[in-house]
Amino acid sequence: VGDVRGAIVAYYEDSISEAVHRTARSERSVRNFFEEQLISESDQRQMVPRATASTALSPRVLRSLEERSVVRHLLQGPGYYELCHDRFIGPVRQSNQDERRTARKRRRLIAAAAAMTVLAGILVLVGFWSEEAPDLDPQQFGFVGEIEADGGPVWHQASDGVDVWQVEVQSGS
């Protein structure tokens, strides 16, 4: 039988990737449309009027998602779009949550790299301006561990272990 939920997540992600690639629309806007328009707060499918859907996403994105059968275009009245099946609600939410988590980690890594670059620049400047410039050996400094959800990258001076610096990165999300 296999992992149905995992298969739906993979299919949803492939469909979004293809729509984004074909239309140059942002992945975040497509994912938001699913979570904010097509799925209600009570985890029910919602019908979205075609005009609203076309404003949130371009008709080309909607057509791409419809071709992949992730959304359905209903021809009642002015026309509506809806998520293809109730079974997609959980996997869509899971995929979007995973993507947000990955994006937060990516932003933290970028911020940590920027902070480390600034710190390295300051250390170099201090070394140039100081009368007793320290002999900065790049082998003395190293990255310790992974960035964790509650902290940031930790740098330490390996020679005697006395000096320890921790750069904490605060995410805006």
Image: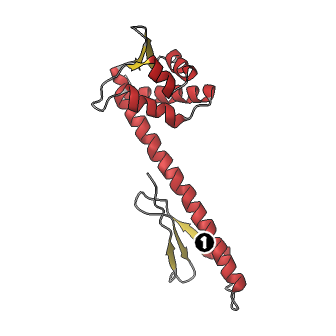
- 96 shown above or below 78: below
In the image as oriented, which residue stretches furthest toward the right? 128
In-front residue for pair 77/64 = 77
- Give the residue at mark 1: 119
Q: How many marks?
A: 1
The quadrant in which the N terminus is found is top left
| Residue at figure coordinates x 53%, y 52% from the top left | 107
In-front residue for pair 108/56 = 56
In-front residue for pair 76/115 = 76
| Residue at figure coordinates x 43%, y 51% from the top left | 173
- Percent of width and height locating residue 105: 49, 52
Instruction: Say which amino acid is labelled 1.
Output: Leu
Say left or right for 39 vs 68.
Answer: left
| Residue at figure coordinates x 54%, y 17% from the top left | 63
| Residue at figure coordinates x 58%, y 20% from the top left | 60
- Residue 3 visible in the picture: no
- Percent of width and height locating residue 28: 50, 37
Say left or right for 11 vs 48.
Answer: right
In-front residue for pair 151/158 = 151
In the image as oriented, which residue stretches furthest toward the left? 42
Q: Label 1's element?
A: helix
- Give the image quarter of residue 26: top right
- 25 shown above or below 126: above
In the image as oriented, which residue stretches furthest toward the top? 76
- Give the image quarter of residue 20: top right
Badge 1, how many Cα within 10 Å: few under 14, some, many 20+?
few
- Percent of width and height locating residue 2: 39, 25
Look at the image and name its color scheme. secondary structure
- Residue 77 visible in the picture: yes
- Percent of width and height locating residue 73: 45, 13
